[in-house]
Image: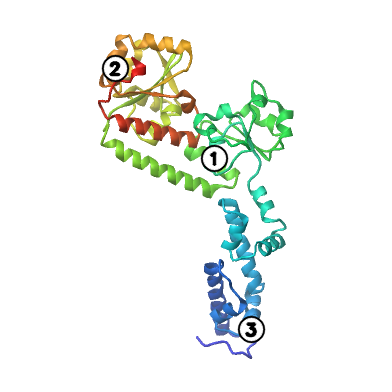
Amino acid sequence: MRELRMHESPEQVSRNPHLVRDARSKIDKTVAYMEAQYGRAISREQLAAVAGLNPEHYSRIFRKYVGTSPMDYLANLRVEKAKELLQHTKHSVVEIGQMVGYMDPYHFSRRFKQLTGRSPAHFIREASPRVMALDGWGHCQALGIEPAAADFARAGGYVSRFASSYIENIREATHPRIDVARLRSLQPDLIMTASRDLEQQLSGVAPVIGIDVLQDPIYGQLPAVARALDRMQEAEAWIAQYENQCAQWRCKLSGIIGGGRVAVLRVREQLLQIYGMINMGYPLYRSLQLAPPERILMQAACNEHYHSSVITVDELPFYEAEHLFVVLQPDRGAYERWRSIIGTRSWREFPAVRKGNVHRLDVANWLSNDPISIMSQMQEAAALLAQGGAHHNYPSWAQ
């Protein structure tokens, strides 16, 4: 393909199909160069050299086919890359400016504001809206968003332990009833709740992201929240990390417990519960893909939203399992109930009890059903199973 001659104007080029293809090819080559090298110092003369053209002629041809000058195109490219980094990374404004080719932070800020109408700092604030998490704090955490306010009690131990001093605990404004005036005074940009009853009431305060409690928390709720917050990239990255963790633990546990069945028993003063495939059962049966008792399988097959069964101690044998996790409510009544249970024949003859495979879980960490809690619950349960094998000592707390 022959070179463009110095005397051939853009008008002459446009009348010659061969010259048009040649010009487009050269422009495309410099655009690709800018895409690959935008973090480095680039001059018009460098771009013209890449195209094999005189700088003035190159600028005229570039403007004809792209609609702007080469350096303006480069500036827009750099600012778009900077916007992605400001929104999806934790680098400072100065660092991001340097990453996209601006060694002078003041030059970067001026150029960014010129092209977007906002300073980089203002853009960050807009990209990270003030979120009030009545529910869904764990979803925010998975997406790299720190809410401005949250109900700590509803978040659960695995999430609220990461609370910073900048997150306001709004428990008193949400329990036992919603204090709308208090919530409005916090000036949220978005409110997250799992209560359909509250959605309409709260919509007068700020736009509401409703969390559907019947959706899968990892593959349903998290992407839905991510779409509302424009954080799909973060959601996909978090899910990939979660799946990698699950795969590693499944592989490790397959050689330790094999196909041994696993059950979850919650002990309260007034009742006993055996959990199904969701909530407390999710990290065991879905994340780790452990085998549940046969009756749990049948109940889940009849009802995909099956939560748990309230049982008597005499019904415990119907949920036989070789490994048992016990969630004991931390109050006197529950402990008294517990002492009465471990003295029964149903308890002593339960397979997991005979084998010494009984593990206690902290109820504060196992009531929440958000992505962060599920990941941590899965890791805790897997570690307990991996440590003990099939014959570890019977735990002293259960004697």
Please say whether residue 57 is visible from this viewpoint. yes
Q: Which residue is mark 3?
A: 57
Q: Nearer the viewer, residue 309 or 363?
A: 363
Q: Earlier in the sequence, mark 2 or mark 3?
A: 3
Q: Earlier in the sequence, mark 1 or mark 2?
A: 1
Mark 3 residue crowding within 10 angstroms, few (<14) / some (14–19) / many (20+): some
Q: Which residue is mark 2?
A: 350
Please say whether residue 270 is visible from this viewpoint. no
Q: Which residue is mark 1?
A: 141
Residue 228 tag number? none
Quarter containing the C terminus: top left
Q: Amino acid at mark 1?
A: Gln
Q: Is residue 316 above or below residue 284?
A: above
| Image side of residue 214 versus residue 398, left or right | right
Q: Is residue 298 above or below residue 253?
A: above
Counting from the top left corner in percent of width and height, residue 366 is at 46, 27
Q: CA distance from mark 3 to mark 1?
A: 52 Å
Determine contact: label 2, label 3, CB under 8 Å.
no
Mark 1 residue crowding within 10 angstroms, few (<14) / some (14–19) / many (20+): some
Counting from the top left corner in percent of width and height, residue 130 is at 66, 41
Q: Earlier in the sequence, mark 3 or mark 1?
A: 3
Q: Amino acid at mark 2?
A: Phe
Mark 2 residue crowding within 10 angstroms, few (<14) / some (14–19) / many (20+): some
